[in-house]
Amino acid sequence: MHDLITTATTNDMVTFGLTESKRELIPLAFASFLDSAATATGRGTFYNSREEQTAAVEAAHRDLMEVDCDVYVAALLMPGVTDYSRQIGVRRLLQTNTEGGLLSAQTRSIVVQRLVQELPTQRMLKLFGTLRRERINNARTRRLILGTLLNADSLEFWAVKYRTKLRVAFTHAWGRRVASILRCVLAKPAGDRTESESQIVCKNLTRWIARNDRVIQSQTTVSVDATHERVEQCVRFILGDESNVTLERLAAYRDAKADFARGSVLPTETMEGLRSRFHRERSSADVLALTKSQLTSGQKIAVQRKASAAGVDVKFDPARYDAVRLYVYAFEMGMTDAIRHALIDKAKRAAAQLPVRFDRVGVLIDSSLSMVGHDTQARRPIATALALRDMLVATAEESSVLTSDGTTMGVCELVQPSGDTSLAGGLVRLLKEKPDAVFVLTDGYENAPAGRFADVVAAVRRMGVKIPIHQFTPVFAAESRGVRKLSDALVAMPVNNPESIGLGLLKALMEADVDRGVAALFGMTKLRQLSLTAARNQRDLRPVLEVNDGISKA
């Protein structure tokens, strides 16, 4: 397993000063964290409720952060960590003041910004809503919310699509009183504002807008350029004032209440809301036909069934979606040649990124009913297993793929989960073919009978069979606070898509050699480079920040 990970360490990050206590605790805490970070989504599974999942994931985050905050911060940056875990990480880092360690407070702040920027917009705003509900409102939180939102290139689009959520976020950062004052002040043209009103705008809005070649005119006034005007209009609209807006989408939102056709530039769900209130004679199909050009990539594949029923042609490019999402789509709408070709191409690309090739591999897929998963994410476990199967087959010259019911299958084939989990027989069949390795793709729950797989592994090892057996699992087990092992002789590795296979390999390395594992973690997340880049950006912004600080104190 060690050879499957490339360890890239910088010269000043070779020695981490781990105590013996940390060497003992980190592998255990990291393994539990990684299992949750790679597989848990905050929803229920076939065997666990949402509440059980949430409690176990929170405990995994808490434990690793308490053992070593630096390792925790680096772990959050790993590719393959779910958005759900990133949100938890941001919340914990914002509400906790940790001193000491390898990473400075500034670096940790930079990591928080990076994690938020990588979240999809809806999840970012959900995080900001969580910060409000949990009353996390320190200076770092306000800086994060205002700096992120006011500098977003998509603020106008977000304003009409997520207006309420943005209002909640801004009000949390500014407070109700300041938000109300800002709405009134921003309604005035910049030239008509009093000195005190201009200072309010500068302190609460202008100072958070990153430098964009603005000309600093004096210690009390910053020129209002196009970017500043755009941000002011968006904020005013978000806070509830639609009068005199001139930006395309903001004006369209206002006008579409009377003129349905003006909604063509609005997000589909926004226009659907306006239709239900102001254009009840129109249908949802009319809205979809009007706004289909505004659909995001994720929406285009999600609305296919609805669009087909409405007779609206919404095209999507399979190459733009990950393999797991394509398999979920194939289960819902059927496999097509376009989907199949995209899956094959993605499998080859993912296989090319692995530093290993095989002459022959065996792949055993758990096709039991539990691999359907929870209703909130139907078929995601089996979709992940099938995507991983395709990648593993692409790493070998020859391959054998079996399902737990004994069926032989090839790449891009669907299997409908059903029945109990019986994997021992399939393992024996694959081992008889003497492959270079056997990969078992399962949720870890064996029940026909329970423990038989572990018995077979123990027996073949006693017989001298040394063929490597690897378990990959796409489901977090709350009762185990990690992914479930089929055998104590195996390392159960978490995976949520083919590209995240490195997470499981890092877990194996951390358990075998904690010092090398920590070095690999810091190398792959490139914390030092991120810190240096952000420091340079901070120096570039210092002249503007100094002027803005002077304004805020005036």
Image (spheres, rainbow, N blue to C red):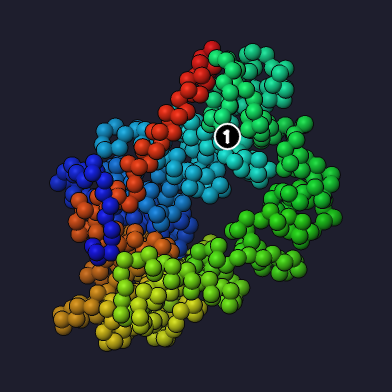
- Local SS, label 1: helix
Q: Which is more toward the observer, 58 or 204?
A: 204
**Residue at 37%, 56% in the rendered image:** 36
Amino acid type assigned to the residue bearing label 1 in the image? Leu
Q: Is residue 7 above or below residue 356?
A: above
Q: Which is more toward the observer, 548 or 286?
A: 548
Q: Is residue 552 left or right of residue 29?
A: right
Q: Which is more toward the observer, 299 or 174?
A: 299
Q: Is residue 513 above or below residue 202?
A: below
Image location (x, y in percent) of residue 312: 74, 65
The quadrant the C terminus occupies is top right
Q: Is residue 182 visible?
A: yes
**Residue at 15%, 81% in the rendered image:** 464
**Residue at 56%, 29% in the rendered image:** 213
Query: Mark 1 highlights which residue?
Result: 150
- Residue 31, quarter of the rendered image: bottom left
